[in-house]
Image (spheres, rainbow, N blue to C red):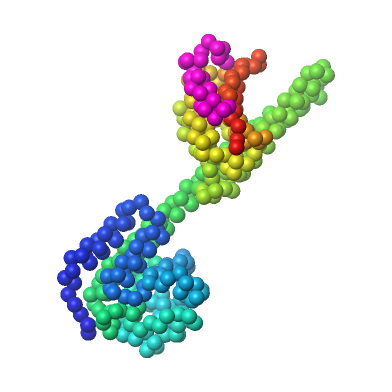
Amino acid sequence: MPYRQIDDPAKLRRVLEATLLLEADLDLDAVLRHVVDEARAMTNARYAALGVLDTEKEGLSDFLTSGLDAGAERAIGDRPTGKGVLGLLIAEPQVVRIPRLSDHEASVGLPPNHPPMTSFLGVPIQVRGEIYGILYLTDKQGWEEFTVDDESLVGALAVAAGIAIESARLHELVAESAVFAERDRMARDLHDTVIQRLFGVGLSLQGLVSGGTETDRSARLSAAIDDIDDTIREIRTTIYGLTMTDVHRGARAAVLGLADELRPSVGVPVRIGFEGAVDAAMTTSVLEQLLPTLREAVTNVGKHADASRVDVMVDVRRGRCLLEVSDDGRGFDPDVTVTGFGLANLRRRAEKLHGTCTVECPASGGTILRWTVPMP
């Protein structure tokens, strides 16, 4: 049996470095590509590959190669499906070392345009008895077959790959659980909010029947329509948040995340609404100014307004971005309290983007801040 003692400190150091990658902030694909490249280099193999099993352990969900150029990979076509010796390793996860691949009873031959391969070393990627994939090498250069030395080195790299895959899948499960919990919370909040607001609209409409002047009935009907519009907008925003994946979340996620962060310190409900294609239209430069503006505006409400609610609207229609923050608090004179409220800061952020920032205190009470900048 071919055998050499592992006496190369450089190889041992490279195995250690590959293992330490698990602590680095790298994605799974980067770690696995490093593992397969190192396995090929350290064993002096012509080709190497790493197959990641799907969650059902019936086929491959990913397949990485080392030693084949892009043209050769395209010529081969579809990646392996788990047949032949590879399928044997999936069904019976144990080390397989073969001097000549074609002589093995499980061999099914190579697909068209595949380079010839002779010696073979296959090592299962598993952690605590759970198999996650296969790391295998072919065509050892300078020897007729792979050695026990190679088997030990590749086995250590396979452990690192297994831990990386297991860790990535655990993170996915945790993330999915967090998403489901957040969606459940959003759905409950939406249900409660909609029921309360529609109940209030119903009472208001019932009041129309009891009489009142024409002007009064018209005003109450207009207010009811506004409430219904607000409710529809809130439903639309929540549904959008429930259906969007993290990959596609951009400006909306940033605004919603900031609102969640501010709610405990503000101490009152912060309702968020969106109009227009916010994620598609919002530029980085605008978002970088909008978020601190929103933070300061909502924080001001919590500090000074004595309000029972805060409404935030982000509207990116008609070639401009409008951030509107309104509350039902005591209101104030913006010309007198500019310094205390930091309004000069908000105005500078708008002017930096050739926009404006205005504050209005309606006769009915509360405050409305409108921060508007043009969109490219």
Residue 293: x %, y % from top left: 51, 28
Q: Is residue 348 magenta?
A: yes
Residue 361: x %, y % from top left: 61, 16
Residue 364: x %, y % from top left: 66, 16
Q: Is residue 268 magenta?
A: no
Which residue sits at x=50%, y=19%? Answer: 344
Which residue sits at x=38%, y=63%? Answer: 33
Q: Quadrant of the N terminus?
A: bottom left
Give the mark count: 0
Residue 264: x %, y % from top left: 47, 30
Up-down relation of residue 175 to residue 82 (above or below): above
Which residue sits at x=18%, y=69%? Answer: 8
Which residue sits at x=37%, y=54%? Answer: 26
Q: Using the rendered image of the protein, determine whether residue 309 is visible from the camera's viewpoint.
A: no
Q: Is 40 displayed left or right of 189 in the figure?
A: left
Q: Quadrant of the C terminus?
A: top right
Up-down relation of residue 176 to residue 86 (above or below): above
Find residue 252 and report its image quarter: top right
In the image, which residues are magenta?
330-355
